[in-house]
Image: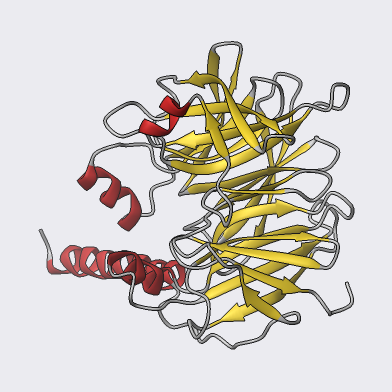
Amino acid sequence: MSRAVVLVLAVASSAFVLNHVAKLLMATGMLKHVYNHAPGTCRFVPGAEQGSEDIAMTSSGLAFISSGAKKLSILPKSVEEDFMPHGISVYEDDHSGEVRLFVVNHAKGHQERVEIFRFDADSNSLYHIKSIAHPLLYSLNDILAIGHESFYASNDKYTTGLYTRMAETWFLLPWSNVVYYSGGEATIAADGLVYANGISLSPGGKLVYVADFTSGVVKIYHRRDDNTLLFSRDISIHSSVHKICVDPASGDLWVGAHPSAFHLAEHLKDASRPCGSQVLRIENPAGENVTVTEMYSDDGRWLWGSSIGCYHEKQLLIGTINHKLMHCTVDLPL
């Protein structure tokens, strides 16, 4: 092999490595500076000290929290014996008024599954209806209920082994996907994501929003008649996007994010180490003139590891992976 060929190969290899390192630096937010500000008066919600990673709201503003201030009774009690909730979603029947809660359950020692509950407001209880497991539901993160027993779910990784999942992360492999489930059958509705996280529905039900955590974008999909998803476009956030709440009144997206995935990873290894928090509002997400506004930002002084921000009538709830739950009054004009 000639020296010229060796030189070309060396330059090409160096360029590839440098390009990948630059992508990792951007994805992890290692060099990002965070400024502190809030939309109004904020306070911690008592009783929610160990995380509140996902929040699902009904049309009336009732909030279900995957680890919240007031524990709901779950019946039968045996369900709680193997119950590790993660992503959650609410389905409201417009005719009967029934409220169902769908929950991603990382059951210990068993295949991951989705639990469906019926909420009874009089007794403040969740009545277990059904457990759903399927080979395509293998690395569940979030869920989006669209029917009594039908839903979309995000698989944040393609592989399940420790080292292969690490390889997916460090090589930024686009192997993550979104699955549609109904009537005992599941299909891959969308793929090609690096880390599919939060998933939400537009008020009209025609668009699905998916947070791609590592890529720092919110992906917009059109729902086809067969419930597969047609990719429309990305909205760049330039932060690690976690969960998405949709304001039913305006259609705006409220996104919980992490300004630095690197500092978040350090926090998850050692919960005593602070990391930043961020909530973004995306106006007109399906239109031509998209506006992204940072509504809350914290360098770790108060709130650590924000995962979701849900807005309802001038009130904002900010959940975290394993820290506190924050409630803010939004005094800014929207």
Image spot of residue 132 (x, y percent)? 49, 20
Q: How many labels does the image show?
A: 0
Q: Residue 123 appears at what percent x and percent y?
A: 68, 34
Residue beneath the point at 47% across and 58% down: 214
Image height of 105 relative to 186, above or below: below
Q: Position of residue 316 (x, y in %)?
A: 73, 66
Q: Is residue 224 left or right of residue 243?
A: right
- In the picture, measured across the screen, residue 36 lies left or right of residue 201, that is left
Looking at the rendered image, the quarter that the C terminus falls into is: bottom right
Image quadrant holding the N terminus, namely: bottom left
* Colour convention of the picture: secondary structure
Residue lying farthest to the left in this orientation: 1
Asked which quadrant contains residue 170, the reply is: bottom left
Residue 198 x, y percent position in the rendering: 58, 48
Judging depth in this view, the residue of 113 and 200 nearest the camera is 113
Which residue: 48% across, 73% down? Answer: 304
Residue 105 left/right relative to 307: left
Viewer-closest of 274 and 157: 274
Please name whichever residue, 224 or 46, is drawn nearer the observer in this view of the structure: 46
- Say which quarter of the image contains residue 15: bottom left
Vertical order, 230 against 274 (above or below): above
Q: Write down the quadrant of residue 327 in the picture.
A: bottom right
Q: Residue at x 47, y 41 (%)?
A: 85
